[in-house]
Image (cartoon, rainbow, N blue to C red):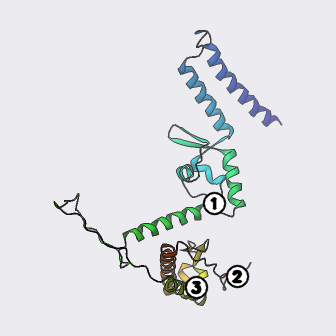
Amino acid sequence: MTEALAIIQQEITAIKKILAVMVGAADRSVENPFSQEVLEKTAKDFLKLSIERGDWVEEEHIRKYVKTAPYHAGNWLRKEFAFTNCYRHGRYHYYSKKDLIAFNEELVKNNIDLNRYKELLEDKRSFDRTMEKRGADGKLKKGKKGKKGFQFPKGVKDIVTSETPKPDPEIVKADLTRLKEEFKTNNYAAYVDVYKGHHAMMKRDYSFYKYRENGQIKSARKWCDNFNYANNALKAITGRQEKFIPPPDENAIEL
């Protein structure tokens, strides 16, 4: 109890000092009793007090409250989740501890590993960028190094082509069926996650990488590329992807 009273006394003393700064300048004028400098200094002092009390969390400590957050998650949280209850003080951003705890509860409720979700988004964006760079033959286009700008020939116009014929969706569906069977036959569940039945990714845990067959890992990675490519093609043709819920890892050990 003595320690708690001492902490409360320290906070009261700090608040008194802040008020003393304001009150000391209160006789400046009736319309504007406090100067902008006084208000700014008071705000900074009160902010410092709030930080010391633990109401606000510096970015490097976010993982204390959001258990699965990636490192340096602050900027990403602000962009991806519109996390607005934060402010910048000096070189650092500070985040509301109360909102971080509530955010973590939402992640737990929705069964989301935030770090893995970030990896999923990055993997999908990388895949989409790769697809944009591919030509009609599916091969990557090679850009010319060092070439800048462009020259547009005079009088060149009205050069177009018809839409590339789309394959029969049944051919793509048959390919997906084959890939699903290949997944089960080779037990790729040990190496691959499939999110929402649509996007495949290699697992990130390399704890036992040394003891796994390199050929199996390589073929599982190729399977991911082929599955994502086929499902992406099906969506381009029909507007819908085919859902695949993989079977569990048959070699997994339940503890």
Q: Which residue is mark 3?
A: 180
Which residue appears at 17% of the width and 61% of the height?
155
Looking at the rendered structure, the kind of residue marked 2 is Ile
Which residue appears at 49% of the width and 74% of the height?
232
Of label 3 and label 2, which has the lower sequence position?
3
Nearest to the observer: residue 192 or residue 63? 192
Disc tally is 3
Which residue appears at 81% of the width and 34% of the height?
2
Nearest to the observer: residue 25 or residue 148? 148
Helix, strand or loop at label 3? It is helix
Q: Which residue is mark 1?
A: 68
Q: In the picture, which quadrant includes the C terminus?
A: bottom right
Report the Cα–Cα distance between label 1 and label 2. 24 Å
Looking at the rendered structure, the kind of residue marked 1 is Thr
Report the Cα–Cα distance between label 3 and label 2. 23 Å
Helix, strand or loop at label 1? It is loop
Determine whether 80 is above or below 117 in the image.
above
- Please identify the quarter of the rendering in which residue 67 is found: bottom right
Q: Which mark is residue 55?
A: none
